[in-house]
Amino acid sequence: MVSFDQSASCAGRGWGRLALFAMASLVFGLALPLSASAQTLRSADAWAELAQGGIRGVTIGPIESSQLPGRGYGTPVSARLLDHLAAMGVNWISITPFGRLWALDDTRVLMDFEAPYADNRQGVREMIAQAHARGMRVLLIPHLWVETGGWRGRVDPGSPEGWQAYQASYADFVLAWARDAADAGADAFSIGVEMKSLSYRFGAFWEKLIQSIRAVYPGLLTYSANWDEVDDVVFWEQLDFIGVNAFYPLADHEGASYAEYVEGARSRVPALRELAHELERPVLFVEVGYTTRADAAVEPWLWPDDMQDVVVDEEEQARGMAALFEAFLPERFFAGFFVWRYYADLDDCSQEAIWGFSPHAKRAEGLLRDVFHARWGVDPEPFPWLRPAPTPAPYPYAGFLPELFRGWDSDPDIP
């Protein structure tokens, strides 16, 4: 049974009413309202037990140029994108307003990104309204951009005083967006992205920050940990989901077969399952995807802009995603994923080259459509009283995706 920590403002509702809502969700397909009082999921299978269905998500990036007005969040073009995603079966989106650091040793997070903060805030609000009008839920992720280059996971102000200044500025940045998320009705919120240089320490800072966020934001909380950072994060028990940016390497050599990719993906399951049960939290892939190039799942962190003679390979992008899905979708502790990423304007080609992460108009998009319409392990059994409970099929298919990934190497003609 799912258990919760509930604030006093929720005390009148009680577990009985929540259970009735959950049964209604299971029987009639109703959406169970997420708590307005910072309820915390307390089980590895909590999302499955709430009968909410898998999080079939897509990350939507802003059009990151002030020279392209009217094509970002909350515009007619983003409404058209959402119609496209709804037809694919998407039921959640994540949106990523950015803050700016000048350099990895800087201590000040600036709120404006390509446009003034007030404009970005309004665009986010309107984007959330557009998504809700289409029956989608929204995860809001305040992101960090380093102007002079470098990975945000290596931020280091270089001194105790520098760390203190950086933490204060970052807290102001995140709390501002947490208030905006509450005002706009975002359904979930990520407190950070790939902050590897400080997520394993500064426990008092994180505890205070999360308490401050809980005080102003009532929805579900996660953190977007890099795949090699997950085991070291010190504050998972204060959040609702174990959030992973799941850019896992699936093989250690070029030319790997799909079977090797699946085996690489399966090897990641036991540790995450164990962590989910240890921390009593479901796992959510906050970002997942591969670039559209040869051997993309061998070293996913290599960006093609820095490579020579890039071989564009749509099949490879789809194979990498399919292998992860085949390994994780049968699991009840696995709440779902957000594909990295589409852009607010479906027709915009200025944000990344053809070898980038976007699956739009590529083979991976057909795969995603099929995956979004399949049944996952976390999904509720429809009308279970009409037939006996099914006997699970052998791993890895578990009866949920029995045909979707079979014969990949012998039949590479994917949608």
Image: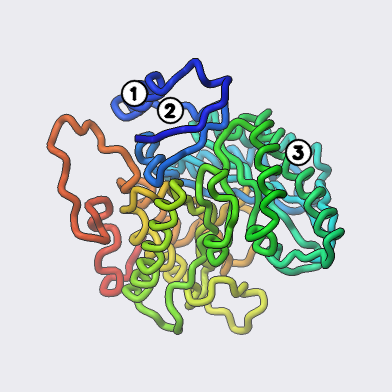
What residue sits 43% from the left and 67% below the top? 320
Residue 24 tag number? 1
Query: Which x, y percent locates residue 99?
Result: 76, 51
User: How far, Cα to Cα, is label 2 from label 3?
Assistant: 27 Å
Name the residue at 77% across, 66% down: 156
Q: Is residue 171 visible?
A: yes
Q: Quadrant of the C terminus?
A: bottom left
Q: Mark 1 and mark 3 in contact (Cβ < 8 Å)?
A: no
Residue 298 placement (x, y as % from top left): 48, 77
Amino acid, disc 1: Ala
Which structural element holds mark 3? Answer: helix
N-terminal label among 2 and 3: 2
Amino acid type of disc 3? Ala
Helix or strand or loop: what does disc 2 sit on? loop
Q: Amino acid at mark 2?
A: Leu
The image quadrant where one finds the N terminus is top left
Residue tagged by mark 3?
176
Determine the CA span between mark 2 and mark 1. 8 Å
Examine the rendered structure and indicate whether residue 76 appears above or below residue 285. above
Rendered view: 302 above or below 97: below
| Numbered label attached to residue 338 | none
Q: CA gap, disc 3 to disc 1?
A: 35 Å
Closer-to-camera residue (116/244): 244
Left-right relation of 58 to 129: left
- Residue drawn 54% across and 67% down? 228
| Total number of numbered discs in the rendering | 3
Q: Nearer the viewer, residue 57 or 212?
A: 212
Determine the secondary structure under disc 1.
Answer: helix
CB atoms of marks 2 and 1 within 8 Å: yes
Residue picked out by circle 2: 32
